[in-house]
Amino acid sequence: MTNIIDSELFLDSCIWIEYFLNKTKETKEIVERERSIIFTSIISIHEIFKKFLKLNKTEKEALEAIKFVEDNSIIIYLDKEIALNAVIAYKKYKLHTIDSLIYSSATTKTKAVFVTADKDFHKTPNTKLIEIK
């Protein structure tokens, strides 16, 4: 895993999903590390819930995962500033709309390092791209 020493991390949906479904060493180290502040986009709440239901997990399991995210991170909600900055990220880094909204949430509202396994973010600054096996 990439050495992540930053004290503030903004986790992409894929990190949370991998943590819940596979508990890989990489994602456990990120989510369970002490002395760090974790941020999450409200859009990730949607994506996590959707993924659980798509994989035929129960609604209860999905809601338990969401509760864990809420209890262990600061949720960043969308606003006008994030929406407008997302358009700039969309254009500059060729991101999909949802990805640009999540990335913009990280860069507009926090100074956290954006952590993802999604290779679409390979050109974005202040991003740690990790490989999930």
Image (cartoon, rainbow, N blue to C red):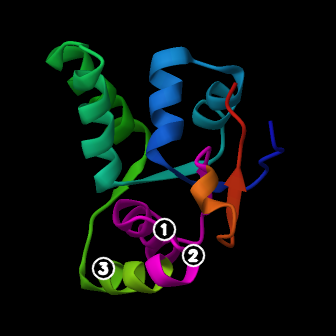
Three-letter amino acid code at the position of disc 3? Ala
Residue contact between numbered discs 2 and 1, judged by CB atoms under 8 Å: yes
- Give how far across and how far down residue 27 sits, in percent: 62, 30
| Disc marking residue 83 | 3
The residue to which callout 2 is attached is 93
- Give the amino acid type for the residue marked by disc 1 in the picture: Leu
- Compare residues 36 and 113 and report the one nearer the observer: 113
Give residue 85's quadrant in the image.
Answer: bottom left
Quadrant for residue 31, please give it.
top right
Secondary element under disc 3, as helix, strand or loop, is helix
Range shown magenta: 90-118
Q: In this view, does 17 lie to the left or right of 93?
A: left
Callout 3: 10 Å neighbours few (<14), some, many (20+)? Answer: some
Which numbered tag is attached to residue 95? 1
Residue at 43% across, 46% down: 73
Q: Is mark 2 on a helix, strand or loop?
A: helix
Depth check: 41 or 93 in front? 93
> What is the crowding at mark 2: few (fewer than 14 residues within 10 Å), some, or many (at least 20)?
some
Q: Which of disc 3 and disc 1 is earlier in sequence?
A: 3
Residue reaching furthest to the right: 3
Q: How crowded is mark 1: few (under 14 residues within 10 Å), some or many (20 or more)?
A: many
Q: Which amino acid does label 2 sit on?
A: Tyr
Q: Position of residue 47 (x, y in %)?
A: 31, 42
Q: In which quarter of the image is the C terminus?
A: top right
